[in-house]
Amino acid sequence: MNRFPKEVYIARRQKLKQLMGTGVLLFLGNEESSMNFKDNWYPFRQDSTFLYFFGLDMSGLTGIIHVDEDQEVIFGDDISTEDSVWFGTHPALQELADSVGVDRTRPKRDVAEVLKDIPLEHVHILPPYRPENLLKLSEWLGISTAAVSQQVSEGFIQSVVALRSIKAESEIEEISRAVDLSVRMHKALMREARAGMYEYELLGLVLKEAASGGGSVSFPPIITTRGQILHNHDYSHQLREGGMLLGDFGAESAMHYAGDITRTIPVGSVFSSQQKEIYQMVLDAYQVAVQALRPGVFFKDVHLLACRTLAEGLKSIGLMKGDLDEAVVQGAHALFFQCGLGHMMGMDVHDMEDLGEPFVGYTDTLKKSTQFGLRSLRLGKQLETGFVLTIEPGLYFIPQLMDQWEAAGLHKDFIDYKQVAHFRDFGGIRVEDAYQITPVGAKVLGDPLEITVSEVETLRSTVGIE
Amino acid sequence: MNRFPKEVYIARRQKLKQLMGTGVLLFLGNEESSMNFKDNWYPFRQDSTFLYFFGLDMSGLTGIIHVDEDQEVIFGDDISTEDSVWFGTHPALQELADSVGVDRTRPKRDVAEVLKDIPLEHVHILPPYRPENLLKLSEWLGISTAAVSQQVSEGFIQSVVALRSIKAESEIEEISRAVDLSVRMHKALMREARAGMYEYELLGLVLKEAASGGGSVSFPPIITTRGQILHNHDYSHQLREGGMLLGDFGAESAMHYAGDITRTIPVGSVFSSQQKEIYQMVLDAYQVAVQALRPGVFFKDVHLLACRTLAEGLKSIGLMKGDLDEAVVQGAHALFFQCGLGHMMGMDVHDMEDLGEPFVGYTDTLKKSTQFGLRSLRLGKQLETGFVLTIEPGLYFIPQLMDQWEAAGLHKDFIDYKQVAHFRDFGGIRVEDAYQITPVGAKVLGDPLEITVSEVETLRSTVGIE
């Protein structure tokens, strides 16, 4: 089975009970999710927090921990003989619960009964991100769906974040496994992409590598000739000689840990000199950022350091100008780098994003900025040993944003819009890898993957791209 | 764009208005569906009825038809500049609406306002199958989520079913495109499957073919060495020499029409003599069923004819016995064929299943049987020219069902449990294709795909399987 030994789950729950001290903790597993009719389901994805504490990867489960009574229960129903004709047999729920160190199981319908005897102020819930779980909470707690958000427990969130943020060695191994598979997916694309192909053909290739490696994808792959669109899930364009292809995708391992890698490659075997120049700026920012990673450093500062490096590059070719310290403070670079430098990664590719960025990426004393660019930075707080995060600088030339900024006269002292106009059709470049924060710095995760200009061009040449 | 010409949608809505005569018809488009946190989405799937009448394939839309005022409105919001940085630009909503022949658009927030002025008894809704749409209906109509099902309009369902059941020539072309792609997916699997491979590797191959052909899958593929589990979505087993592999999957075309094909192949190049014998029984039932297809015939009778053919085969090798007419009436064959012979197919692989089987597959005078086996038959009613449906007989040897029936002494006059015991480890065989009902009979859809024992064995031998 794709689970850690039961002791792992027992220890995690033990730590959580210590952190919470008191209360009744409610963990909602996920249900099957319908596509175009009830029984036509998307591939099942269990809730990550449920997986972290209870390890069981199937629909229809709920977990309750009574901290004060030191009691743990998994609620669910065994499969009927008729259902087993259609879906095969599972081990009995009690056997499954035993495998993660939980003694007690009860039928699904008992959740409501158990909860109705507990005063609402003792019940701790996490924010639901699926509507069916919102409906369950409303029903079980006897409150309106609108009132559910008021019931969300900050203490519960903070305890879960404290535990899940620090990856154990066994988790690092799982993440590395996901990254290794992600590397294989990228290598396949880097070897096969050729002028004349369509983006969707490469999507097929990438999905095949993920599934053939026993995994799936950790998020819908971005495979695009239009890298300037940050979250582009359109796959309809043809690869053209002289253009670039941006691939931002990763595997999810069988145990549901994520990989997340980005590479930008020339459609031919070499970059144009302009592409090479911009690529090198992005890579410089990547390397500066990686060098700065260590426990105690604010990731916001690492982000700003990368922004400053990007701005220097842009100034060197005349797209930016003036005092770069001031330019970065004012956010002028965000015309070219609109997003954040990275995010936590674990069982979720944006780890624990369902629990809320204020808790995962920021603190009571460090709140998220509202400035364009910085407001998309998911992680700002001080790094700790055991964090896993991505480093993903980029430069994106977005015509409608250029037009909007120029028309509004934004950051005229720092941006030379006349020069910028020459890059309207340039596209976008991003590179990304995942790093583990160690006591002395940071360590890249997974097998090596070509990243420098010469490594990428060498790979592209040796696979026979013209 | 992946849409029919606007005249198609105008004509469909026109016919619907005629069928309904009066009322306000509400069409809920689908939303993005979250996996493990809000913004990590499954691939978007628009609601099929929304697609049928409004053709727009994006989230966040609602359609309203005021039949009495002959007025049609699409509700939705244009993309903001900031969002376009992340997701790229779309055409404006008004332009999209024009492309499907709808004059009026309004912002999303206006839906509630429009609906609050209309008496509830004039509002027609279809049954929601996604919880977010249930929540929307509850909010917009000012009724509890529990009350939404009472608001569902049978007249609306019946009108939609009447129109969507009869496929136009342009739809048949789209379905054929999906079936052609499904054939390519099956051919890839039939060429590549070899002893030692894992099921998940073949899943990868099939996903690649679907995506490379510009489509996706119409339901989660079944690719299993354990064909006796009817809806098996486990891919963890290794292919072993002497075993069989059942593949039941199909493509969804870019316009969201479905294909659905099943083949069962030997892991080596040839079937064992026992496998060949059972396979031929399934194929005989398939052919008998196909011969019986024509307008006016009850599909329930075609199903029973196939069951009778399967029973004859089983009797010929001693697994069944006695009066076969009586055996089929009593449902004894369902020990080996637990499911239905086929289902409607269109934009949904089980077409319109969200609208309810009583309307799609049965009538006021023909209700679904409650007998084991027959109660899984999705389609029973008389066939009409323009229906598209699948024919998918099978024989499945399910140890826990054998044990259960034998222990209960079920159908002892028709089943020789001693002989059946020899097939405990046999597995399962199914073959399936899609047919269009024509005025004179039925026509298989899509490119040809090996199906007879000798065709399958020839293919497997020529690709070099030992």
Image (spheres, coloured by chain):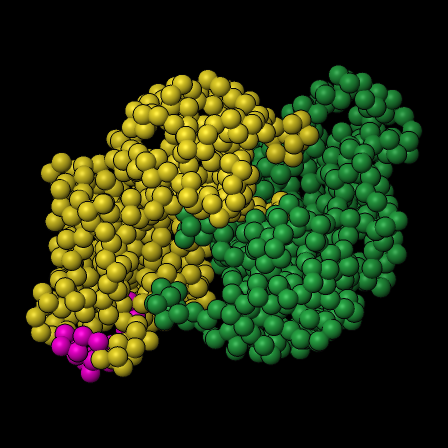
Chain colours: A green, B yellow
Using the image as rendered, state which of residue B34 and residue A105 is in the foreground: A105
Left or right: A100, with B422 as reference point = right
Q: In the rendered view, would you say A181 is above or below A323?
A: below
Q: x%, y% of residue A268?
A: 58, 37
Quarter of the N terminus of chain B within the rendering: top left
Residue B79 vertical position relative to residue A143 in the rendered view, above or below: above
Please provide percent x and percent y for residue B304.
Answer: 16, 58
Residue B366, image x, y percentages? 20, 49
Task: Give the camera-side residue of A37 and A386.
Answer: A37
- Picture mark count: 0
In the image, residue A394 sits, relative to residue B67, either above or below, namely below
**The quarter of the displayed image where residue B169 is located:** top left
Q: Give coordinates of residue A462: x percent, y percent.
A: 58, 47
Quarter occupied by the C terminus of chain B: bottom left
Residue in the picture at 52% in, 66% down: A108
The residue depicted at 23 percent of the width and 51 percent of the height is: B367
Look at the image and tell me whether residue B212 can be seen: no
What residue do we see at 13% from left, 36% from top? B439
Magenta span has B424?
Answer: yes
**Which of A204/B318 is in front?**
B318
The magenta region covers B410-431
Q: Residue at x 17, y 61 (%)?
A: B307
Horizontal side of residue A430 vs B110, given as left or right: right
Q: Is residue A33 magenta?
A: no
Is residue B228 positioned above or below B20 on the image?
A: below
Judge left or right: residue B281 versus residue B101.
left
Q: Is residue B451 among the parts visible in the rendering?
A: yes
Task: Please indicate whether residue B430 sits to the left or right of residue B128 in the image.
Answer: left
In which quarter of the view is residue A27 placed? bottom right
